[in-house]
Image (cartoon, helix red, strand yellow):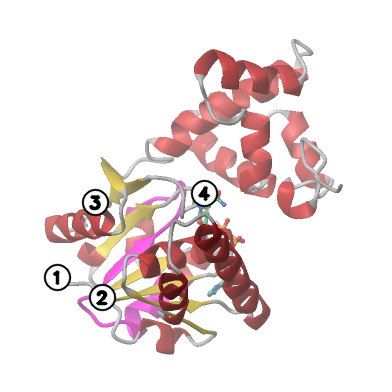
Amino acid sequence: MDIKKVAVIGAGTMGRGIAQVVSTAGVGVSLNDVNEEILSSALGTMAALLEKSEKKGKISGEDRKNILSRIHTTTKLDEAVANAGLVVEAVPELLDLKKETFKRLDKLSDGKSILATNTSQYSITEIASVVSDASRVIGMHFFHPAVVMKLIEIVRGLLTSEEVVMTLRDFSTKLGKETVVCRDSQGFISTRVLLALRLECYRLLEEGVASKEDIDKTLRLAFGHPMGQFELADFSGLDLEPPICESLAKVFGDRFRPPQNILHQVKAGRYGRKTGKGWYDYSK
Ligand SMILES: NC(=O)c1ccc[n+]([C@@H]2O[C@H](COP(=O)([O-])OP(=O)(O)OC[C@H]3O[C@@H](n4cnc5c(N)ncnc54)[C@H](O)[C@@H]3O)[C@@H](O)[C@H]2O)c1
């Protein structure tokens, strides 16, 4: 299977990064969102990042122009998926919305194209249940920021075909990424490990054992993590966490029950960097 065009559905934090990664590898991208303004903002983000890379000498001016010219934006899903060998869904982390999107993708896409979801935790098998041929549905989990992070976690649903797994592994290599493959299990490898660590950091703060600054400093300096968990949570968006914890707790029990302090941040609309305030203050 040779993938010559990729459709990315959802142009938010992840979708725009994934589109840039794909285009940088020389593959055409159709970036879709329900909101025209978000598509313009996505193009603006990508242009600014590419300009930075050019200034640092990582790419040429010609490269920058070519990468941007390979990205086409549209609010029309049928237009986005036409002739795409791979569709990567990156709409918000809501299971019903994802299933609704896959129902539409099933109808609109070429029956042979790979349908991938960037979900951080939902069951690939359940998302695939609304598609007539579940063997072409797979998890393709990029990390934020997609342009920088080296790993793609490939998640095999119960019915995902071996050919689709192999094609996606090869394509990820073409994107300059490393891969890990796991079977469908709530939270896969990455989200399960991450949330276990993060919730323990929140509990340390809630119990008054240490300040968030010192907990973050411990992770950075004792364990070599590039960021502490409070910093990283602010970077990714705190609003994503309660639904993820809820789903993990349903399967694994109380160890994934979120402490009050994270729930209060979200109730107060303090989602981290994207709202200017979260665990830390970015308003200045
Ligand atoms: N943010 C992260 O750090 C991160 C990391 C890895 C994976 N993910 C996963 O990636 C997915 C997207 O997360 P995000 O942080 O980019 O979310 P986001 O809210 O930043 O972006 C989602 C985008 O989808 C658009 N959208 C909503 N409904 C749509 C529809 N029906 N069709 C097309 N577009 C639609 C929204 O307008 C928005 O622009 C989620 O499944 C999330 O769990 C997020």
Looking at numbered disc 2 in the image, what kind of residue is underneath it?
Gly
**Picture residue at 26% right of the left edge, 75% below the top:** 85
Q: Are marks 4 and 3 in contact (CB under 8 Å)?
A: no
**Residue 1, label in figure:** 1
Residue indicated by mark 3: 158
Q: Secondary structure at mark 2?
A: loop
**Picture residue at 73% right of the left edge, 35% below the top:** 262
Front disc: 3 or 2: 2
Q: Give whichever of discs 3 and 2 has the lower sequence position.
A: 2
The answer to if 117 sits in the magenta stretch is yes
- Neighbor class of circle 1 (other Cα within 10 Å; few <14, some 14-19, many 20+) is some
Residue indicated by mark 4: 144
Q: Give whichever of discs 4 and 1 has the lower sequence position.
A: 1
Estimate the x, y position of residue 185 in percent, counting from the top left: 35, 40
CA distance separating discs 2 and 4: 24 Å
Q: Is mark 4 within 8 Å of ligand 1?
A: yes
Estimate the x, y position of residue 73 in percent, counting from the top left: 51, 82
Looking at numbered disc 3 in the image, what kind of residue is underneath it?
Leu
Residue indicated by mark 2: 85
Residue 230 left/right relative to 277: left
Q: Secondary structure at mark 1?
A: loop
Residue 231 left/right relative to 101: right
CA distance separating discs 4 and 3: 26 Å
